[in-house]
């Protein structure tokens, strides 16, 4: 896993089994989180290229701002 993907996994954790109600929606919830992770990683990488900086630094700056 690339560092930016690891970071997005921390920013968007997968739900624990039993925490999604109704339980039948658990797979959908996991799919939504995976999509959020992917979109976040793509946005960070694009911003990093545009600003010519490390996407990880951008993510850290974003976390500090919130």
Image: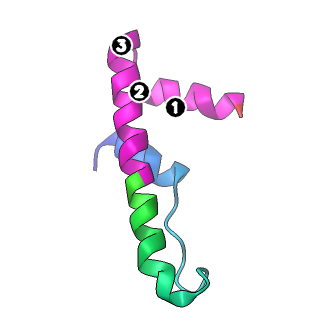
Q: Residue furthest right?
A: 66
Label whose residue precedes the other's in the sequence (3 or 1): 3
Q: In the rendering, at what x and y percent does residue 39 appear?
A: 39, 43
Judge whether 39 appears above or below 63 on screen. below
Question: What is the C-alpha distance between the residues marked 3 and 2?
Answer: 10 Å
Judge whether 35 appears above or below 16 on screen. above
From the image, tell me which residue sits under label 3.
50
In this view of the protein, can residue 36 be seen by the observer? yes
From the image, tell me which residue sits under label 2.
55
In reply to whether residue 40 is colored magenta, the answer given is: yes
In reply to whether residue 27 is colored magenta, the answer given is: no
Name the side, left or right, on which 2 lies relative to 16: left
User: Tags 3 and 1 in contact by the CB under 8 Å rule?
Assistant: no
Name the side, left or right, on which 63 lies relative to 30: right
Residue shown at 34%/24% (left/top)?
46
Question: What is the C-alpha distance between the residues marked 3 and 1?
Answer: 14 Å
Residue shown at 52%/61% (left/top)?
13
User: Tags 2 and 1 in contact by the CB under 8 Å rule?
Assistant: yes
Judge whether 49 appears above or below 38 on screen. above
In this view of the protein, can residue 54 be seen by the observer? no
Q: Name the magenta segment's main secondary structure.
A: helix
- Dividing the image into 4 quarters, which one contains the C terminus? top right
From the image, tell me which residue sits under label 1.
59
Helix, strand or loop for disc 3: helix
- Viewer-closest of 61 and 23: 23
Helix, strand or loop for disc 2: helix
Q: In the rendering, at what x and y percent does residue 38 appear?
A: 35, 48
Which segment did they paint magenta?
A: 36-65
Label whose residue precedes the other's in the sequence (3 or 2): 3
Residue shown at 51%/52% (left/top)?
10
């Amino acid at each position: 896993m690339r560092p930016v993907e690891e970071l997005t996994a921390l920013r968007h954790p997968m739900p624990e089994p039993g925490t999604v109600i109704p339980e039948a929606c658990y797979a959908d919830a996991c799919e939504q989180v995976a999509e959020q992770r992917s979109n976040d990683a793509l946005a960070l990488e694009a911003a990093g290229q545009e600003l010519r900086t490390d996407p990880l630094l951008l993510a850290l700056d974003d976390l500090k701002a919130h």
